[in-house]
Image (cartoon, rainbow, N blue to C red):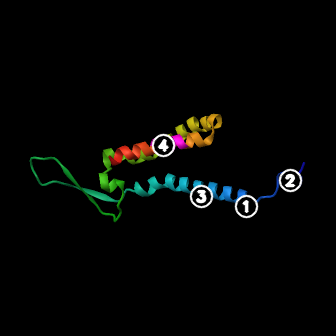
Amino acid sequence: MDVEEAFQVVGEFGPYQKRAVAVLVLTQLYMACQSMLIVLVGATPEYKTEQEDDSSSNQERVIFTGDIDSIVTEWFLIKQQAYKVSLAGSLFFAGLLVGNIVFGPLSDRIGRRPVYLTGDLESLKYEVKIRL
């Protein structure tokens, strides 16, 4: 059986297939943006440190010279704390890996809808706890 005969048996690429492909492409674009987000929010601008003038304290003052707002400037993730930016990206991808390993076979066994709704309900419970 060649491709033309297969299309005659199953039908042409219709509106439903176009919609399904569009939803899948949009989902993949969303995940690509999520994956690249750590690059944008974890940008490290140039900075310099100055010794405080107090003789009793041995503290340094950090001055960011770049005009960038990121988690690095917000939480001062420099020097010994700089590993946390990479750690955030690594944990994100580790979560994707574990989620695919666990929920992929589970959705094959009990169906995609119950697995999706269970995950959605758990995130909703977490969101409600945070707001309270």
Three-letter amino acid code at disc 1? Pro
Choose between 117 and 100: the one closer to the eye: 117
Measure the C-alpha gap from mark 4 to mark 1: 31 Å
Is residue 91 in view? no
Q: Residues within 10 Å of mark 1 (few under 14, many from 20)?
A: few
Decide: few, some or many residues near mark 3? Use Cα within 10 Å; few <14, some 14-19, many ≥20.
Answer: few
- Measured in 3D between alpha carbons, the distance from the residue under mark 2 to the one under mark 3, in whole angstroms, is 27 Å
- Between the C-alphas of marks 3 and 1, the distance is 16 Å
Which residue matches tag 4?
121
Nearer to the camera, 92 or 63:
92
The amino acid type, in three-letter code, at marker 4 is Leu
Q: Earlier in the sequence, mark 4 or mark 1?
A: 1
Residue bearing the label numbered 2: 3
Alpha-carbon span between mark 4 and mark 3 = 23 Å
Asked whether 59 falls inside the magenta stretch, the response is no
Quadrant hosting residue 84: top left
Marking on residue 15: 1
Residue at (89%, 51%) from the top-left corner? 2
| Residue tagged 3 | 26
Q: Amino acid at mark 2?
A: Val
Q: Position of residue 131 (x, y in %)?
A: 34, 48
Q: CA distance from mark 2 to mark 1?
A: 20 Å
Which residue range is magenta in the image? 117-122
Q: For residue 70, which quarter of the picture?
A: bottom left
**Residue drawn where x is 58% and y is 40% of the image:** 114
Q: Is residue 29 left or right of residue 68?
A: right
Q: Residue furthest bottom?
A: 67
Of circles 2 and 4, the one toward us is: 4
